[in-house]
Amino acid sequence: MLKKFQDIFSIPELKKRILFTVGLLIIYRIGGHITAPGVNPLALKAFFQTQSGTIFALYDLFAGGNLSRATIFALGIMPYISASIIIQLLQAVIPYFEKLAKEGEEGRKKITQYTRYGTVGLAIVQSFGIAIFLQNLNVGGAPVVTMANLPFKLLTMITMTAGTIFVMWLGEQISERGIGNGISLIIMIGIIARYPADMLNTYRAITLGNMTPFRMIFFAAIMVMVVASVILITQGQRRIPVQYAKRIVGRRVYGGRSQYIPLRVNTAGVIPIIFAQSILMFPTTIASFFNVGFLEGIQQWLAPSSWLYVSIYSLIIIFFTYFYTAIILNPVDLADNMQKYGGFIPGIRPGKRTSDYIDRILTRVTLPGAVFLAFIAVLPDILIYRGGLPFRFGGTGLLIVVGVMLDTLQQIETHLLMRHYDGFMKKGKLRGRR
């Protein structure tokens, strides 16, 4: 393995890309410690310590902890992700966006531009909402905002919107001039930044006698198996063979080869968990601001420690897994594209028969992926409230970290193999996610 890392830094272009990526990620982490003007960070930190299990904690996870510190990157990359999801959903319901998605490189450029405009718009609205929220926040008699009303709102909107645009630019630069997956790497580095504190809490639990060594070894074995299963599901795919007929164009012969359509077990990625968390955390967040008996009852019913929460959470994840998979992967479009280029699935007639066949396989393949997503999502709550583990392991953070690391390894593997170096895997190229 040491020889592999030596090979990485022996390729000038790859070395330059890695160092460029690391440099931009360091800049992102430095900006994550610059507090926005007019905010009392200690009072805000005390508030967020009471908001575990609410939508604020979810947003703070993707912002890399910047929201709880009210930094210039408090919005993080979430406005960009929200804009991307909105544009992606619009492609399924608005013909104009669907047409852009099918126009190749030019269409993708326009979609990217619309995503950027949407990011700026969402950042302005969200930063204004955060400014109002912080002004109305009073923790233990100590106000969170120490500035006048209007100047604070303007400064917050300008600072946080500019911070979001800068983070978006960092992600695009990493994707273009670094090792790729810029936006994903920024999210991942924010999640990983929490791990040292979690490890410290685990060490304190062991030293204080709250967790026996045998119990810790047992949980460590569970963690290893969970990470291995996440990698397996993330990489897992069902390959549908496709045969292309020979075509003669001029003096060249096209087709006559066998390929396959890779249907991933987890096509939807981490999006279903995010949707499910947002839905379940919304009533809890509202209940935390109003002392109403009905809302407090809902908050108790939807507490992460209750089996009702676990059951509803799991069912919503399974539903959104199928829903989002149906949006981003259309069997009818796949069948039409195959028929257009002279492709067919052996033993299946082109057209409707092909689309029905792909839809049937996709439905079956998605089921284990949906059930696994539900299991990974509820695992942290089970380990904390039933097993006594002192930190959250699994869920959205684990899926993002494992997925991004696999994609990054694939990028590095491609650079090594292109220059006739051995990859990380002994048996050849690392199979990346398709």
Image (tube, rainbow, N blue to C red):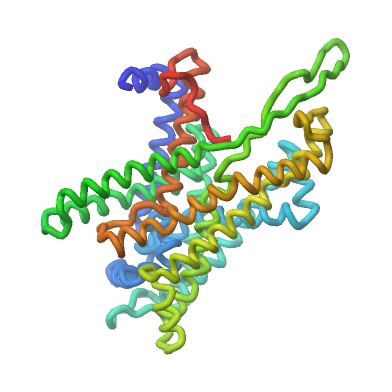
Residue under the point 69% across and 42% down = 108
Considering only vertical position in the picture, is 223 above or below 308? above
**Can residue 158 be seen?**
no
Left or right, residue 407 beside residue 25 = right
Displayed quadrant of residue 336: top right
* Viewer-closest of 124 and 308: 308
Look at the picture and state if 342 lies above or below 77. Answer: above
In the image, farthest residue toward the left: 208
Furthest residue in direction front, as rendered: 347
Can residue 50 be seen? Answer: yes
Question: From the image, which quarter does the C terminus lie in?
Answer: top right
Q: Where is residue 198 in the image (x, y as percent from the top left)?
A: 26, 53
Name the foreground residue: 24 vs 80. Answer: 80
Residue at the (45%, 19%) spot, across then down: 427
Query: How far across and how far down the image is residue 25, in percent?
Result: 40, 42
Residue that sits furthest to the bottom in the current view: 293
Residue 88 in the image, given as x and y percentages of width and height? 66, 52
How many callouts does the rendering have? 0
Residue for point 78% across, 31% down = 347
Does residue 383 lie above or below 291 as drawn?
Answer: above
The x and y percentages for residue 1 are: 33, 22
Q: Is residue 421 left or right of residue 210?
A: right
